[in-house]
Image (spheres, rainbow, N blue to C red):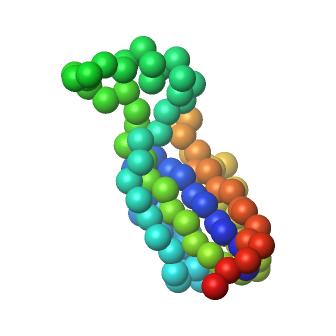
Amino acid sequence: MKLLIVTVVDEFQKDVLRLFKQANIESFSGSDIEGYKNGTSSFMMNASWFPSQKSGADSSMFFSFTEDKKIDLFFELVKKFNENLETNNPMHAVVVPIERSI
């Protein structure tokens, strides 16, 4: 079992859910996050006690404890998805091995 973590701009949230379904990943969790590029410089430049506008992009993070074969298929699907993008906001996925679990 491994931990799959996926981040994506909100525009592609439905696409992540579709890819999870195609890869037979049925159990997962998600959360709203803000994504930053060149995080330190843009984040620090816009930092204030009462910011007038957000500097990050509305994004989502999903994670699932799942099997290698499902992750392999998911990665293939993400690669195909990213190849057809017309934006500079690809879907990102990483895998973290699990040493112990209960």
Residue 93 pos. (x, y %)? 65, 56
Q: Quadrant of residue 2?
A: bottom right
Q: Is residue 71 shown left or right of residue 43?
A: right
Q: Is residue 7 left or right of residue 45?
A: right
> x and y percent of residue 99 in the render?
77, 73
Q: Is residue 85 above or below residue 68?
A: above
Q: Residue at x 41, y 41 (%)?
A: 34
Quadrant showing the C terminus:
bottom right
* Quadrant of the image containing the N terminus: bottom right
Does 52 appear above or below 25? above
Q: Residue at x 66, y 69 (%)?
A: 3
Instruction: Please report the residue visible at 51 percent of the width from the left and 74 percent of the height from the top.
Output: 28
Residue 8 in the image: x percent, y percent?
Answer: 50, 50
Count numbered badges in the picture: 0
Q: Considering depth in this image, is 20 or 2 the residue closer to the camera?
A: 2
Q: Is residue 14 above or below residue 26?
A: above
Please tell me which residue is depicted at 26% across the width and 22% down the height of the picture.
49
Residue 29 seen in render: yes
Q: Quadrant of residue 48?
A: top left
In-image side of 87 versus 57 (left or right): right
Locate residue 36, reporting x and y percent: 49, 33
Which residue extends farthest top?
45
Vertical placement of residue 49 versus 11, above or below: above
Query: 71 or 44: which is nearer to us?
Result: 44
